[in-house]
Image (spheres, coloured by chain):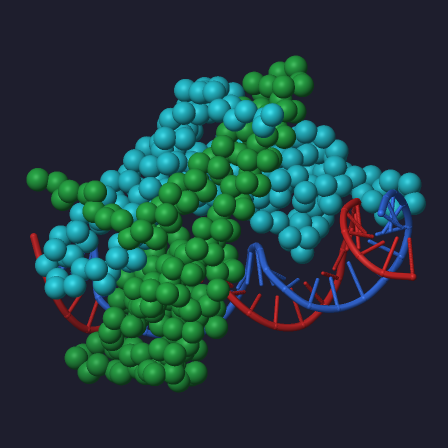
Chain colours: A cyan, B green, C red, D blue
Amino acid sequence: MILLEYILLGMLMEGTMSGYDLKKTIDSTVGTFYKASYGSLYPALKRLADKGMVTLTETDNSKNKKLYTLLPSGRIAFLEWLSGPMQSGRNEQLIRIFFFDYLDEDLRQKRLAEYLFKLDQEIHMLEAVQSVVAGELADIENPENYYYRVSVLAYGLNHFQMERQWLRDIMERKDLNHVKPEN
Amino acid sequence: MILLEYILLGMLMEGTMSGYDLKKTIDSTVGTFYKASYGSLYPALKRLADKGMVTLTETDNSKNKKLYTLLPSGRIAFLEWLSGPMQSGRNEQLIRIFFFDYLDEDLRQKRLAEYLFKLDQEIHMLEAVQSVVAGELADIENPENYYYRVSVLAYGLNHFQMERQWLRDIMERKDLNHVKPEN
DNA sequence: GACTCCATGTAATTTGTTACATGATTGG
DNA sequence: CCAATCATGTAACAAATTACATGGAGTC
């Protein structure tokens, strides 16, 4: 089971969809972190069907459109993946959080706390690196020749700090609607 | 020529290194955005050697250590890649900026401005999506059941805004050393 | 009639990961 | 002497991208 398969199962939790619609849904939700091409999506759907996790219904309205529906086995596999500990790649965590509305509050808070812990570790590591680099730069004659190298370190730190703040906000279930629909 | 090959050439701009040291250097600099495993690194170095972009020198100090040195052809290929327009994957941009100390100021500002433009576009798109979603949420009975889905949208926006601020800072060549080595 | 969107899929090629295999050197 | 780090590489496997191939439906 690869990540895409879990994403497909998760999207099908909302209801029956075609492969085409699944791609559009993925693009418009987690598209910023995850790209799904048809070349990977259709084979993944086929694998899920082979495993008995989804059924496909051929619609007879003159197109060869196929609708995919989640089966109990697929639902179980999805929820098991969703409940698992924070461990895998960065993007996978984000995608899992996207589906956290399906997870109960206890486990949710536990997983988010684990993530926060990991983030703190990474921030401390990067701060240590930055500290070392700052020391090295002080010793050389032309530190301005390393401006962009150093800036990329700063980028990493900014990124993790942003992520940390965001995590803290959602752990408190803060209101995210600072956005007013333009009038 | 794949991304890793350009990264290797770029790292060799600083001087001769072994494959092992190249991996360590990559991990400790652009490691946050790019992972290089030996299974991809050594074959990449071999390809670069076959293309005549690097030479390998066997050191005879009783190890089978090999040192790689950048050749003029490799330097040209690297600088050409570095000069190219902003187009490819997100991470590739960041890695290029890491090497921007090797680019002249005119081209540098041009590329950074292109990147900023692209970022603004993405921010506008995400804001539009968020606006649509906010409207949809207002119409449904239980909007709190979509909290995490919405939070991931907010994450994307936060990310791009952070990136935008960072870009503006380095375009002005602001001082990035807000960091004091701990005392 | 042309263009865009809907809709599905395959195949070649490229690419990367993982595990394996080997062995020297250094520091405690 | 034992563990960690240095050091290089291959092979099997898994995976994704890209291009290709096809065709219906709606709309300007």
Q: Nearer the viewer, residue A136 or A125?
A: A136
Give the total of numbered labels: 0
To which quarter of the image does residue A158 belong? Answer: top left
Residue A67 placement, left or right of A148: right
Q: Position of residue A62 (x, y in %)?
A: 92, 45
Q: Position of residue B117 (x, y in %)?
A: 49, 51
Q: Is residue A19 visible?
A: yes
Question: Image point 48% across, 48% down: which residue?
Answer: B119
Q: Position of residue B26 (x, y in %)?
A: 32, 61
Question: Image point 45% across, 51% down: which residue?
Answer: B116
Q: Is residue A50 visible?
A: no
Q: Quadrant of the C terminus of chain A?
A: top right
Q: Which residue is at the far top?
A: B141
Residue A160 placement, left or right of C10: left
To which quarter of the image does residue B180 belong? Answer: top left
Q: Nearer the viewer, residue B130 or B47?
A: B130
Question: Image point 39% across, 36% down: which residue?
Answer: A163
Above or below for B143 versus B40? above
Q: Quadrant of the N terminus of chain A?
A: top right
Above or below for A87 versus B33? above
